[in-house]
Image (cartoon, rainbow, N blue to C red):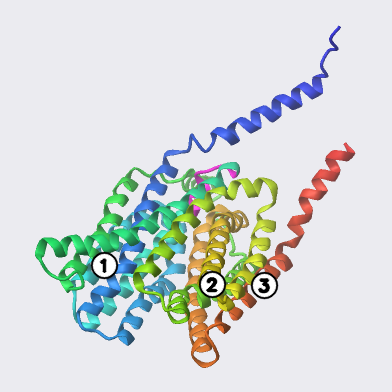
Amino acid sequence: MASAPNSSESSTTQDIVVREKPAFSGMLHLPRNVYLLLFFTLGKGFQLSISALTLNYYVHSLGYRPDFIGVFSAMPAVGALIGAVPTGMLADRIGRKPVLLLTAALTPLFLATCGLVTSTPLLLGASLIQGFVSTAYWVTNLPLLTESTTEKQRVGVFALNSFLLLGVGALGNLLGGAIPEFIAGILHVSAASTLPLRWGVFSAALFTFVFGLPLWFLQEPKRAKNVKQATTVVKTEAPAEPVSKERLPVWLFLQLLLPDLVFTMGEGAVVALIQIYFVLRFQLLPGTLGIIFTISGLAGGIFSLTAPLFVKRWSKLRLITSVQYLTAPLMVLIGFAPTLPLAIAGEYARSFMRTLIEPVYAAFAMEQVSDRQRSTLSGFYSVTWSIGFSIGPAVGGWLQSNVSLSTSFVFGAFCLLLAPSLLLTFFGKQLLRPREVERQTREE
């Protein structure tokens, strides 16, 4: 005789099934906003990789020397530094869709302008403004993805976003080389001449413009509507009491931004100079170097898709800090590798780990603040990125020139040990919460 099932166990089993089904099918049935944002991210990835390959070559074809090209390359970061926080605050005030539409239209405009002008002031000005307007993507994309997904979907969507931006977008390196050669074949000129490279810059701008057109169908999150309705109710029911604005959590922002600043300094000291390191250390030709880093970007982007699997087993904070601690010795390995295969293996492992925690770090940060503060936080993250990738390469370059090629990797490793230590100091108590919940469930 079969025993009757326990009603409490039966209901618990049903709850588990109900909970697990959306978690599995949630990645297959995403809101329309998510698909629109991911589609734009794909175009953004192609734009970044194509312009990175063709824009500096275009300026070089105009006859400018490397010292000016270095200043020209720094202008977008300076523009992002100036515009990140104001753009984030503007997005929190007027909505993220209008700001994202502006960057989808203005970024290709000023990028194409960079490919048209030839004089020094116009080149620097166009590059600066292009960096200023393009920062709106970085301060609106993650908050919109956060608000358009559930907590179970978020890491997976962020991983897919990183894969499209860094992995698939890395294929733009191949397009960036093929497009000038194709135009040069039609015009019967050298691929290194100004006109084919100009068309390469135009193609990068075209990707952003075309892939940004569907953003007109983006729906503003309900958060903005609810805020407006709540404000109207407060004004009609209690006009004498002013609406209190949500204060900026300065200390929380500092706790989130300081570890990221240290982390980007370490990354900047290595990533910004790693191609030069491979050339000087192992005497690689540009073609071989391009193949190595194209494979690294594509494989790293694919590996980032595994982030949800790791988050299910470990918490976001535990995964972030563990990967950063493990990345530090990999940097030392790359810097002191006696052979090229060992250095490439270390670089691939470092790249895989970096792309693995990219979506997890973003999800962790966005979940620490309220929805009204996410664009502002993203703006500050753009500031820390700009500062980190200015200080890091400067320190790394000085160390490589005055000490040795390998010492910049030691500096990077030190930063990657300090960053997770700061995160654990500020947010380490969150690691104890799952254990406390588990103890309570066992006691019950």
In magenta segment, residue 149: yes
Q: CA distance from mark 3 to mark 1?
A: 39 Å
Q: Is residue 100 left or right of residue 105?
A: right
**Tag 2: amino acid:** Glu
Q: Determine the image quadrant of residue 412.
A: bottom right
407 in magenta: no
Label 3 to label 2, Cα distance in Å?
Answer: 12 Å
- Measured as percent of width and height from the top left, residue 349 is found at 57, 62
Callout 3 environment at 10 Å: few (<14), some (14 to 19), or many (20+)?
many
Mark 1, secondary structure of its residue: helix
From the image, tell me which residue sits under label 2: 267
Residue of label 1: 110
Residue farthest along the bottom direction in this orientation: 402
Q: Which residue does the image show at 11% across and 60% down from the upper left?
A: 186
Image location of residue 239, percent across then percent down: 53, 51
Report the quarter where the C terminus lies. Answer: top right
- What residue would you read off at disc 3? 417
Q: What residue do we see at 50% from left, 54% from top?
A: 143
Precedes in sequence: disc 3 or disc 1: 1
Nearest the camera: 116 or 283? 283
Quadrant of residue 51 within the rendered picture? bottom left
